[in-house]
Image: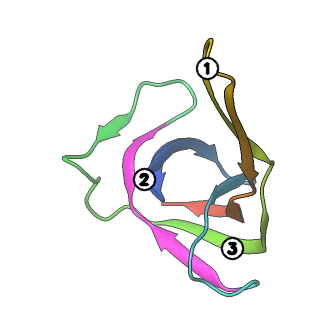
Amino acid sequence: MFAVIEVGGNQFIVQKGDIIEVKKQDVEVGKKMTVEALMISGLDGKDMKLGAPFVSGSQIECKVLDQKKGEKVRVFKMKSKKRYMRNKGFRPSVTQLEILSIA
């Protein structure tokens, strides 16, 4: 069984046991959090439930594995023929989640 969930403004396709990285969530490491599903389907795709916007009664249980910084993002600005260049970067904070159950 797999589900489509929305966490931190982004949507993810998840199965039980998956580990995903999402935008920083205010949950302590080791704690569990629940998310509602946008869509739930079996592996064969026959028994599919669509939500409007969420599937009623759906609970996706996640465990917070880590709070860390993600990959570096480069921001480069340039104006041609004017000798103007700016190169900045930052590392966004991310939360690593493990999917425990889909119900």
Q: Which residue is mark 1?
A: 82
Residue 27 x, y percent position in the rendering: 60, 83
Q: Residues within 10 Å of mark 2 (few under 14, many from 20)?
A: few
Residue 89 relative to residue 6: left or right: right
Q: Which residue is mark 3?
A: 63
Residue 35 relative to residue 87: left or right: left
Nearer to me, 103 or 74? 74
- The majority secondary structure of the magenta stretch comes to strand
Single out the mark in the foreground, 3 or 2: 2
Nearer to me, 8 or 3? 8
Q: Which residue is depicted at the point 48% across and 58% down?
A: 7
Q: Which residue is depicted at the point 31% across and 65% down?
A: 57
Image height of 6 relative to 77, above or below: below
The Cα atoms of the two marked residues, 1 and 3, are separated by 51 Å
Q: Is residue 51 visible?
A: yes
Residue 89 x, y percent position in the rendering: 74, 49
Disc number placed over residue 9 in the picture, else none = 2
Residue 43 relative to residue 38: left or right: right
Q: What is the three-letter code of the residue carrying label 2?
A: Gly
Residue 35 is a magenta residue? yes
Tell me, yes or no, whether the two marked residues, 3 and 2, touch with CB atoms within 8 Å: no
> Which mark is first along the chain, 1 or 2?
2
Nearer to me, 65 or 9? 9
Q: Residue furthest left?
A: 52
Q: Quadrant of the N terminus?
A: top right
Residue 46 is a magenta residue? no
